[in-house]
């Protein structure tokens, strides 16, 4: 369970995740981008929605950690 929690929080070997403008995405960010491309009808550009997507994934991580301890 700790491994799953670590992956969901974007952690690795103690590295800090870069800020929204850092250009490096984790798996959750990439998954949200893929969902936007697939279900957005081709009208959504994930690069333009990076800040909003970052807030969404951060909130999701926070809720996951709160519920799993």
Image: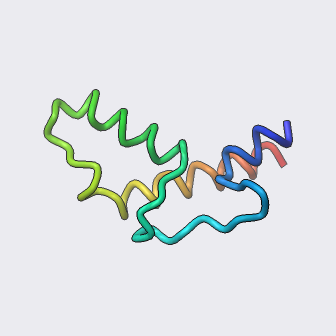
Residue 5 in the image, given as x and y percentages of width and height? 76, 44
Q: Quadrant of residue 47?
A: bottom left
In the image, residue 3 above or below residue 25:
above
In the image, residue 24 above or below residue 26:
below
Q: Which colour scheme is used?
A: rainbow
Residue 29 located left or right of residue 37? right
Residue 66 in the image, given as x and y percentages of width and height? 75, 52
Figure quadrant of the N terminus: top right
Residue 24 located left or right of residue 69? left
Residue 51 in the image, given as x and y percentages of width and height? 37, 64
Viewer-nearest residue: 30 or 64: 30
Q: Which residue is drawn at 54% across and 69% down?
A: 18
Viewer-nearest residue: 26 or 35: 26
Total tally of numbered discs in the picture:
0
Q: Which residue is drawn at 36% across and 35% down?
A: 34
In the image, residue 4 above or below residue 56:
above
Q: Which residue is drawn at 70% across and 44% down?
A: 7
Q: Quadrant of residue 39?
A: top left
Q: Residue at x 56, y 56 (%)?
A: 59
In the displayed orientation, state which residue is furthest to the left. 43
């Amino acid at each position: 369970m700790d491994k799953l929690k670590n992956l969901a929080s974007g952690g690795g070997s103690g590295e800090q995740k870069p800020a929204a403008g850092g250009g490096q995405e984790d798996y959750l960010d990439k998954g949200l981008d893929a969902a936007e491309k697939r279900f957005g009808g081709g009208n959504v550009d994930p690069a333009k929605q990076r800040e909003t997507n970052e807030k969404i994934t951060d909130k999701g991580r926070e809720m996951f950690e709160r519920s799993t301890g």
